[in-house]
Amino acid sequence: MLQVIGLCRFSYPTAGGSGFKLGRATSDSSHALYETRRLQTRLWLFRTLCLPTLLGQTDPDFRLIVLVGEGLPEFARKALDRMAAGHPQIIIRAEPEFQPHIDVCSRLLLEQRDPSIPFVAEFRMDDDDGVGLSFVAELRRIFALSRGLIRREPRLEVDFCRGYALKLLADDLAFKPVVAAHWGVAQAFIQRSDTRRTTMNFPHYQSWRAHTAISCARAPMFIRCFHGFNDTGDRWDKLRADSDPEAPAQSEARLPELLARHFGLDLETARENLRESALAG
């Protein structure tokens, strides 16, 4: 009764809207979307954080569209193809650059809808985000418990608002437990599948103004990354760490256990891989 579809924009240059606008690398633009070191960083995060948390879902019945530009450098496209190989849930779509942001993203989401399934849950995530291993299963559980509400409302926002902020350092990974509503990570919109509107039509940070929203803070369900190649800027220092609800006095000591349990992330292995990668230093 519920189809689950996600969209990940992998450095897709958009013509406007809330997507990336930097375009291809030039000699005087070291942070352009196709600059080699930037793409190496995004690929490392996609391989280490984004993809494993999706492929480890307790409910594997979902699809993720990875949107890339047709001009994405060959080394990055081949790396993505290798990572997606053997995983039918992951669909890589190359599109001409600089299409209107909402138009191209919505079209790809609509193409994946199955008209025989009456309801759809759509989510978006960046290539440096992670979601909890029970994300898809919890969406289905909430859908089953909220059927009357969903039939009454045009759509329902489900916002998993507890998780971790992750700062990518030169040779380390730093985490802060946070509670952040409507961040857009581990957030989904459930609606009838015959509507032409998609999750891209609703700004993630203010959708609650117009739609019924369910906020879930029981367990950590997202990891959002902060680094020099995204738009998070200096917000890391402004984030207030929130104590672990299961063991407030032991949040830091229990971090490896919690990351492994909720995200399937081996913290020490990830740190070692970072130090050994070309990104360190």
Image (tube, grey):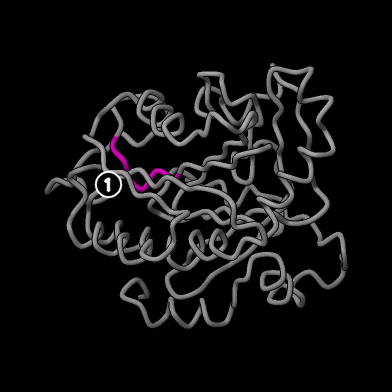
Identify the residue at horizontal 71%, vertical 36% (top origin): 158
Name the residue tied to disc 1.
33
Q: Is residue 172 left or right of residue 24?
A: right
Secondary structure state at the residue bearing disc 1:
loop
- The amino acid on which the numbered mark 1 sits, given as a three-letter code, is Leu
Q: Where is residue 76 in the image (x, y as percent from the top left)?
A: 25, 59
Compare residues 190 and 238 and report the one nearer the observer. 190
Q: Residue at horizontal 35%, vertical 28%?
A: 104
In the picture, measured across the screen, residue 177 lies left or right of residue 227, that is right
Residue 96 on image: x %, y %: 21, 34
- Image-based side of 160 in relation to 120, left or right: right
Q: Is residue 133 above or below residue 101?
A: below
What range is drawn magenta here? 8-13
Residue closest to the eye, 50 or 136: 136
Question: Most extreme residue toward the left, as rendered?
Answer: 27
Secondary structure that dominates the magenta span: loop
Query: Percent x, y for residue 129?
Result: 52, 53
Quadrant of the drawing holding the N terminus: top right
Q: How crowded is mark 1: few (under 14 residues within 10 Å), some or many (20 or more)?
A: many
Which residue sits at x=74%, y=49%?
Answer: 138
Location of residue 249 (image quadrant): bottom right
In the image, 123 versus 224, the foreground residue is 123
